[in-house]
Image: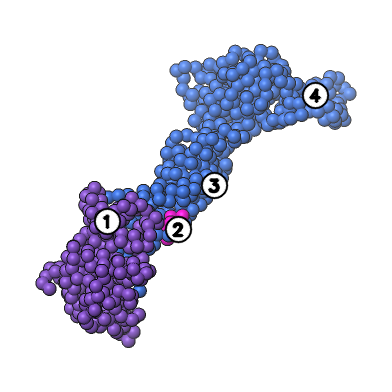
Amino acid sequence: MVGKGIRIEGLRKRYGSGDTAVDALKRVDMQVAPGEVIGLIGPSGSGKSTLLKALGAVIDPTAGRMILGDEVIYDDGWKISDLRALRRDKIGFVFQAPYLIPFLDVTDNVALLPMLAGTPNSEARQRALALLRALDVEHRAGAMPSQLSGGEQQRVAIARGLVNHPPVILADEPTAPLDSARALAVIRILNDMAQRFETAIIVVTHDEKIIPTFKRIYHIRDGATHEEAGQGRSID
Amino acid sequence: MISLAGRDILHSWGKFVFTGVGLGLLIGVTLTMAGVYRGMVDDGKVLLDNSGADLWVVQKNTLGPYAESSSLNDDAYRSILAMPGVAQAANVTYLTMQVRTGNADVRAMVVGIASGATDTPGWPPFLVAGRQITRSHYEAVADVATGFELGDRIIIRRNQYKVVGLTRRMVSSNGDPMVFIPLKDGQEAQFLKDNDAIVQQRRRTAENPSLNRPGVPGLLDAVIASQSSNPYVNAVLVRVKPGYAADEVAESIRRWKRLTAYTRPQMEDILVGKLIATSAKQIGMFLAILAIVSAAIVAFIIYTLTMDKIREIAVLKLIGTRNRTIAAMILQQAIVLGLIGFVVGKITATFAAPFFPKYVLLIPTDSIAGAIAIMVICALASVIAIRMALQVDPADAIGG
């Protein structure tokens, strides 16, 4: 992989200091290419959420290096002053629950991110509608989140994660509340979107239904990652 | 950029409207309380306006005739009338009492007015029905707030009076409607006792050897006659000639007549600064408490509404929403809540005011000041919720 996607080298996170210090992340090395969807799996307390928060720029790692696209964003310290803008423009998030904004309709839930970045409302909505079309939920564009099914809500959440065309999307247990068919449908969508938008997608999961679909998997144990090949089972 | 606050309000309009209505009723009470105070001040000013006087001459060293009792000889007006700069001077009596009509009675200020033309100081300046008093006894002009009607027979002390005219907004500084009667009747009303009391007083006088001397015939009759009449009035209302300064005329009366004379601004100070000062403080305390309660309610509501959105706020922060956008959302909601509350409160106060027994004056400047105060209170009340929202960790949106 050259210059795109995300690369993490020797990332560490220590909570506390002295005798009470806890090393939540001891050494994380990862690399995800554009268009690639990888699985990040591990038992509870292994450091998955800490890693996700560090990659999402909501906690400060203790040491290491992160390169997003062509840009070094962390090298034993943040290299970007506006982490909020970093999260808005260069990192997409998909959560276990969709967490759509209940008082915005589907279109504006997706269009909100570009609007926050200063894109004119009409242009942001056009971009949102294009994504909703790609995700086959355009017919619900004017609906409120409470009027959508669980699967539709998750597709809207994926659209929101993609709308600013971020180089990386962090998906936290995106299929946990879904049955097998819908879970696989979500993974299919993530794969399609990753390839269409050349986005690197990291899926944190426990979900046995989807783990076999990943071509590459990072196991995280005791704060350290280990790469292994996945089964890459076809979803179609 | 879309208005997050506006969308949230539209989405949860029922919650905002009902909360706003509840807050509005509280604001309505606050505005009405302010109106009660304004009404008291206005009653005082109306009392002064309607008296038609430039100066109030009262017993020396008293704050009469409204804030303290004052007693002057009823011939004092003659010498005042002779003072330079005095155009008109007329006696007046004031007596607050229950005026009976049939089986009911009405609290009213009975005003004894001197005979003369209709522009005599003390007379009601206008009528809404009937005519002014033309006889020297037993006719009355009443404020419509008494509920009396033309031709009604009213009883003041032992005498009956016929209501021949009706006027409007003629009230005492306490808001009691006025009943105008001839001066002599007014003096009698202040003095007249029941028959038993008169008999008792005559008996006591007759038993007093210093007042009932066998060698001085006619003394007892003279004393009893003096006890049976009232040569006093409460004030002399003075109108100043054009070209004369009221202050100078007042000073001249003080100096040469050994009486106290108040100008219009001085009388306003007495009414507003002394007579209704305690009531004003009382209302001020209520307003302060209501403002605090309103602030607490708005703060609680906004805090609760924000607490309901903690997860959404965490998501908004995670996806890059600026703190100021989130703070503006909460602040705008608080302001909208205040606006709904103000509109409801203003409407409530406007429709409720006529039903109050005393005059409630809602003036635009109070409404504007109230609206600004509510906006400030709402803005301050949203600070707690904003503070909490800004402390939300975007990491909370990520599981684990």
Q: Secondary structure at mark 2?
A: helix
Q: In the picture shown, does residue B358 fall above or below B127? A: below
For the record, the magenta segment spans: B301-307
State the residue at coordinates (34%, 68%).
Answer: A181
Same-chain status of marks 3 and 4: yes
Q: In the picture shown, does residue B29 fall above or below A98? A: above
Q: Earlier in the sequence, mark 3 or mark 4?
A: 4
Disc 2: which residue: B304
Chain ID at mark 3? B
Front residue of B127/B16: it is B16
Q: Are marks 4 and 1 in contact (CB under 8 Å)?
A: no
**Three-letter residue code for mark 2:** Thr
Q: Is residue B289 magenta?
A: no
Looking at this view, name the residue that lies furthest to the front.
A236
Magenta segment main secondary structure: helix
Q: Which chain is purple?
A: A
Q: Which mark is residue A16?
A: none
Disc 4: which residue: B223
**Three-letter residue code for mark 3:** Phe
Same-chain status of marks 4 and 1: no
- Where is residue B220 drawn, in percent x and y? 84, 23
Q: In the picture shown, does residue A49 fall above or below B78? A: below
Disc 1: which residue: A132
**Three-letter residue code for mark 4:** Val
State the residue at coordinates (71%, 28%).
Answer: B99
Q: Quadrant of residue B121?
A: top right
Observer-side mark, 1 or 3, equals 1
Q: Earlier in the sequence, mark 3 or mark 2?
A: 3
- Where is residue B18 drawn, in percent x and y? 49, 48
Quadrant of the image containing the C terminus of chain B:
bottom left
Same-chain status of marks 2 and 4: yes
